[in-house]
Amino acid sequence: MKQLKAVIFDVDGTLAETERDGHRIAFNKAFEEHQLDWNWDEDLYGELLAVTGGKERIGYYLSDFNTGFEFAGDLTELIKALHASKTKHFVALLENKAITLRPGVVRLINELRNSNLRMAIATTTTPENVTALIKNTLGEHAMEWFDCIAAGDIVPAKKPASDIFDYCLEQIGFSADECLAFEDSANGVRSSCAAGIPTIVTFNAYTEEDDFTGALSVFNHLGEVDLACEHIAGKAINNSFITVDVLKQLHAQD
């Protein structure tokens, strides 16, 4: 049995509720900036989340939801420009403290810092988004707490492909069975499990109906001392919130 040595976090929807009140808002601001009459409401955005990656999500919208859109120029360049604008607006939302971390995230990260476990991030969002989220919620020096920030286009294939987790494992120097991953979506679970990493799910409003087959355990959030998490599926815990000791116990049961 391998010993738990590292915890790898997804970002969007896992560390923070960034999708509905962050990325969606930023996309709409980018569309407005480029004088497009597109508007992604909450329901539409939930459907678009079937595809990971911001540029890929715009492409999916055009291919499956806005098929009548005509553009005389280079569509690839338009998508790149829209995504760059969206990143700018998303960072501004973070700097204005419009997005906060989910229940239990700060507590668990601080516990991990005080333990002998390492931390890393594996996400499809851009490095700029990760940096802005971490610095504006955990502090200016918090990026130093993570051994690896695997983000964005650093690998060719995004989740549900395993590439981002494979890259992260290579960077931190641990085998898959020496780690745990935290994810919030079906695509995320498919990605981490394809890399062989035992995975805990903390779903959100967009992903609560997802298929989390393969996950070690599924919860609504990490929980706090005064806010119990709810166990939904998989391995149960003998505690009302997720701690480092709980992580070690779950890992041992994999």
Image (tube, rainbow, N blue to C red):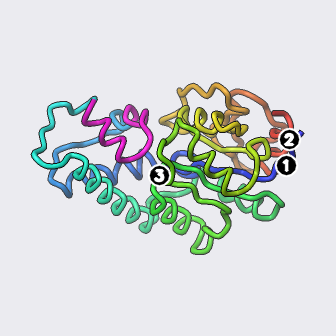
Residue 253: image quadrant is top right
- The residue under label 3 is which amino acid type? Thr
Which image quadrant: the N terminus?
top right
Instruction: Name the side, left or right, on which 207 lies relative to 174.
Output: left
Across and down, in percent, residue 36 comes to 16, 48
Which is nearer the eye, 169 or 96?
Answer: 169
Q: Residues within 10 Å of mark 3 (few under 14, many from 20)?
A: many
Instruction: Name the side, left or right, on which 49 lies relative to 160.
Output: left
Tell me which numbered mark, 3 or 2, is placed earlier along the sequence.
3
Label 1 vs label 2: CA separation? 6 Å
Which is nearer the eye, 61 or 169?
Answer: 169
- For the residues carrying marks 3 and 2, which lies nearer the camera in this image? 3
* Number of marks in the rendered image: 3
Residue 145: image quadrant is bottom right
Which residue corresponds to the image point at 68% horizontal and 62% vertical from the top-left? Answer: 147
- The residue under label 2 is which amino acid type? Gln
What is the magenta range? 46-63
Q: Are marks 1 and 2 in contact (CB under 8 Å)?
A: yes
Residue under label 3, please give it. 125
Q: Are marks 3 and 2 in contact (CB under 8 Å)?
A: no
Query: Can residue 57 be found in the magenta stretch?
Result: yes
Judge whether 143 appears above or below 150 on screen.
below
Residue under label 1, please give it. 245
Tell me which numbered mark, 1 or 3, is placed earlier along the sequence.
3
Q: Residues within 10 Å of mark 2 (few under 14, many from 20)?
A: some
Instruction: Name the side, left or right, on which 159 lies relative to 104.
Output: left
